[in-house]
Image (cartoon, rainbow, N blue to C red):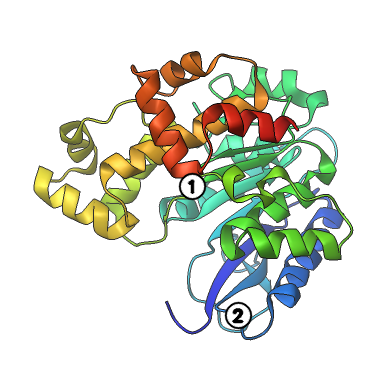
Amino acid sequence: MSQNEVLEVGLLIYPGVQMASVLGMTDLFEMANHVNGKDAAKTIRISHWKTTEDDGAPARVFDSFPLAESEPAVLVVPPAFGVPITPEVAQVYAPWLRQRHGGGTALGSVCTGSFLLAETGLLDGRRITTHWTVDAYLRARFPKVALDADQVIVEDGDIMTGGGAMSWIDLGLRIVDRLLGPAIMAETARSLLVDPPHREQRYSSTFAPRLNHGDAAILKVQHWLQATSAKEGDVERLANVAGLEGRTFLRRFKKATGLTTTEYFQRIRVGRAQELLQAGSQSIDQIAWDVGYSDPGAFRKVFTRIIGLSPGDYRKRLRT
C-alpha cells in the first residue's frame, strides 16, 4: 500500500435522480476524509458520473482528486423520482454497471436506485432491499431477486442496497466503515449528529472481500461464491468456474484475495449468519445448517474465531 491509498466512491447521476442524495453522500464522504485527517493512510475520492455527448457512456463529471485513472472501489446508484427505471436509462447505464462490476467494483443502490441495479441482471439470486412502497413492483419485474424489504440496509458482499430515500446516510456510513474502518465511521456519524449503524462495533462488521486485484478468473469465482452464499466449497468445481488447473487456481486465489479458499468460504458463511442472527428468530443450529454447516458445533467455533463473540452472545449484544 502506498503512503496514501485513494479509494474512489462513484455516485451515478442519471435522468430523474434525486440530487439531494448525490450531494448528501458527497458531503458525508468529505466529512469522513476530514475526520480521517490529511495524513491518513487511506482517503476516499468522491466522483460523480453521467453520460457525455461524445459516445453516450458515463464519464466522471466531478472528481475530488484530479486525473483519476483507476476503477472506483464502489459505485452507488442513488434513488430516482417516481417509478423507476425507463428502458432508455437502463439501456445506457446497465451495461456500463455490469462492466464496472466485472472489473472489481462493488455496487450499491439507495431506495429506488435498486431498479437500475436490477436491470443489470447482477442481482439475480442476491439479497437486496428497496423502499417498501415499491417492493411488489420490483418482485414482479425482477422475480429472481431475493428482496427483503424489511431491512434498511442489506450487504451481500460486493452488492450493497439501502431501503428508503434517506438510507443514503446508512449506506454511506457502511461504505466509510469498509474503506476507512469502524472508528472513522463512528466519528463521522458523531460529527454529523446521526446515529451510526450497528457496524460501528468490531464484531458487527461483515466480510468485505478484496475485488480490485485485477485477476478476472478469480473475480469470476468470487462473484459465483457470493451468489451461491459459498454453499459449495469443492475446489475442483471452483477451478472449473475459473477455467484453471487446481494448483494454479489455489495459488492465484490466495494471491488475489489474501485468503485461502477455506478462509474465504468461512467468512462468506459467517457474514450470512450475522445477517440471520440480526434479522430473525431462527435457532443457532438452524442458522448453521442454512449457511452450509452440517455440524453446528463447528459453526460456533468458526463464528467465534472470526467475530470474537459466540453466535448467542452476538445476537444478545445486537438486540441490546
**Is residue 312 at least partly visible in the picture?**
yes
Callout count: 2
Residue 300 vs residue 40, the one in the foreground:
300
Answer above or below: position of 183 versus 131: below
In the rendered image, residue 316, in percent from the top left (x then y), is placed at 67, 29
Residue 40 disc label: 2
What residue is pinned by disc 1? Answer: 98
Residue, x 49% and y 76% (percent of image)? 69
Report x, y in % for residue 161.
Answer: 66, 40
The percent coordinates of residue 228 (x first, y second) are 40, 28
* Residue 229 visible, this orientation: no
Toward the right, the furthest residue is: 193
Describe the element under mark 2 as helix, strand or loop: loop
Is 74 on the left or on the right of 102, as rendered?
Answer: right
Residue at horizontal 62 percent and vertical 63 percent from the top: 9
Q: Nearer the viewer, residue 137 or 257?
A: 257
On screen, residue 287 versus residue 185, left or right, reads left
